[in-house]
Image (spheres, rainbow, N blue to C red):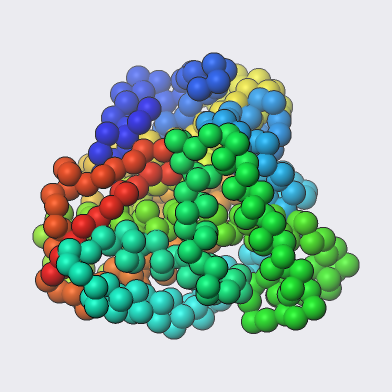
């Protein structure tokens, strides 16, 4: 079900949710799976202990062919308890609100430098290339201790993994290349640790005599891919939404202290990571009178759930006052996104800084002409021409 515009989920979602919030769908490989589009059912399903995130399970709904062939050791989004619980505990403290706030100066510095370079360049500028891609890339590099000179390689390679246009072989080869790079980074930090997340995790795992290089490599790869393309697309879509709505933009400029509320609503509205909440059933259970059998694949459409009118009045409008913290943009349950506090802070800093420093920023092309992409896992704007 492709999205037809940058500012909303696939139009079929509303019809499916209205007619049958739990329904059957056919995947690209011809297999069938359940699709959940209702908010209450999505939260209840994702809270169940009878579902699995194991991508190697034959029943897991593969939306992007080829992803399952990538080695998954250390990729905690594909783990189940108790293994998942152990690794989650080790990482959670690295992404608390308090810990993430310590990154504010670095994120501000990265944002300012990107805007400086954009202002010094030609007009119009492409906001995607000038700001949306480099900021989260450099933040992840800072977090993991990746050398500055290597940042450009990740921008192109993460796109290959997340794009529907990539072949299975391209996704596999790219994921293996990234994994090999992160492995080399981990090897270096084993003997020469720095002030970065990978170095701290090495120390933590060694402290409980559970250190495994391959597992830490997988964790690093997950953080790299998960924290780059998604945040980049949210920056682009958020900026486009603000530039397309003078009243919304005026509210940001007049009351920047409300930006965290705006960010939350933009996360709900765009819900860019739509199907990362896919699962496979491992034990029969019922939900709304429907029996889910062991081996059934289930897709929870986060964008559909976050646009459920039973929960969010006028869901297709951006309403900063609605208080949308119960959206599913970061998933729900034990696999809720670890990096959500970091994503929120990046969006807050980028939006406040961008529109404060360039008060006359405007779209060079109308929204209708923006080059738009709609992929199985994530969506966004290819280019965002702006001028001032």
Among the 4 quarters of the image, the one containing residue 259? bottom left
In-front residue for pair 32/41: 32
- Looking at the picture, how far across and down is residue 32, in whole percent? 55, 18
Q: Residue at x 31, y 49 (%)?
A: 381
Can residue 77 be seen?
no
Relative to 41, is 84 on the left or the right? right
Q: Residue 250: which quarter of the image?
A: bottom left
Q: Quadrant of the C terminus?
A: bottom left
Number of marks drawn: 0
Residue 190, quarter of the rendered image: bottom right
Location of residue 130 in the rendering, given as x and y in whole percent from the top left corner: 32, 66
Q: Which residue corresponds to the image point at 64% horizontal and 52% vertical from the top-left?
A: 177
Q: Does residue 177 appear left or right of residue 241 in this picture?
A: right
> Is residue 264 shown above or below 82?
below
Q: Residue 296, position in %: x, y?
A: 63, 23
Q: Nearer the viewer, residue 260 or 145?
A: 145
Q: Quadrant of the N terminus?
A: top left
Residue 220 percent across, percent down from the top left: 65, 61
Please tell me which residue lies in front, 171 or 250: 171
Q: Is residue 276 above or below residue 250?
A: above
Against 248, is 289 above or below?
above
* Residue located at (62% from left, 55% from top): 178
Residue 170 visible? The answer is: yes
Q: Residue at x 50, y 45 (%)?
A: 160
């Amino acid at each position: 079900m492709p999205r037809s515009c940058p500012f909303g989920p696939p139009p079929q979602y509303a019809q499916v949710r209205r007619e049958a919030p739990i329904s059957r769908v056919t995947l690209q490989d011809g297999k069938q799976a359940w699709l959940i589009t209702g908010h209450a059912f999505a939260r209840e399903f994702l809270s169940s202990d009878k579902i699995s995130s194991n991508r190697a399970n034959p029943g897991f709904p593969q939306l992007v062919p080829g992803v399952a062939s990538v080695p998954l050791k250390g990729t905690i989004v594909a783990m189940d308890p108790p293994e998942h619980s152990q690794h989650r505990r080790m990482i959670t403290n690295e992404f608390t609100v308090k810990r993430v706030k310590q990154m504010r100066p670095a994120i501000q510095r990265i944002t300012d430098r990107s805007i400086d370079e954009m202002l010094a360049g030609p007009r119009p500028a492409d906001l995607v290339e000038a700001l949306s891609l480099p900021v989260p890339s450099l933040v992840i590099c800072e977090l993991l201790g990746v050398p500055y000179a290597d940042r450009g390689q990740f921008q192109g390679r993460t796109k290959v993994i997340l794009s529907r246009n990539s072949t299975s072989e391209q996704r596999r080869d790219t994921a293996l290349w990234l994994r090999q790079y992160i492995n080399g980074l981990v090897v270096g930090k084993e003997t020469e640790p720095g002030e970065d997340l990978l170095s701290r995790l090495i120390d933590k795992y060694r402290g409980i005599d559970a250190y495994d290089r391959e597992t830490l490599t997988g964790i690093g790869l997950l953080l790299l891919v998960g924290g780059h393309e998604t945040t980049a697309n949210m920056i682009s879509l958020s900026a486009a939404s603000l530039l397309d709505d003078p009243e919304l933009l005026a509210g940001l400029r007049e009351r920047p202290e409300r930006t965290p509320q705006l960010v939350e609503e933009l996360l709900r509205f765009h819900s860019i990571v739509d199907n990362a909440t896919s699962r496979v059933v491992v034990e029969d259970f019922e939900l709304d009178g429907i029996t889910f059998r062991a081996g059934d694949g289930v897709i929870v459409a986060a964008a559909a759930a976050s646009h459920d009118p039973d929960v969010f009045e006028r869901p297709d409008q951006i309403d900063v006052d609605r208080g949308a913290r119960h959206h599913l943009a970061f998933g729900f349950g034990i696999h809720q996104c670890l990096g959500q506090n970091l994503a929120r802070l990046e969006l807050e800093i980028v939006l406040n800084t961008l529109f404060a420093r360039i008060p006359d920023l405007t779209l060079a092309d109308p929204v209708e002409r923006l080059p738009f992409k709609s992929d199985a896992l994530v969506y966004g704007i290819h280019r965002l021409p702006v001028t001032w």
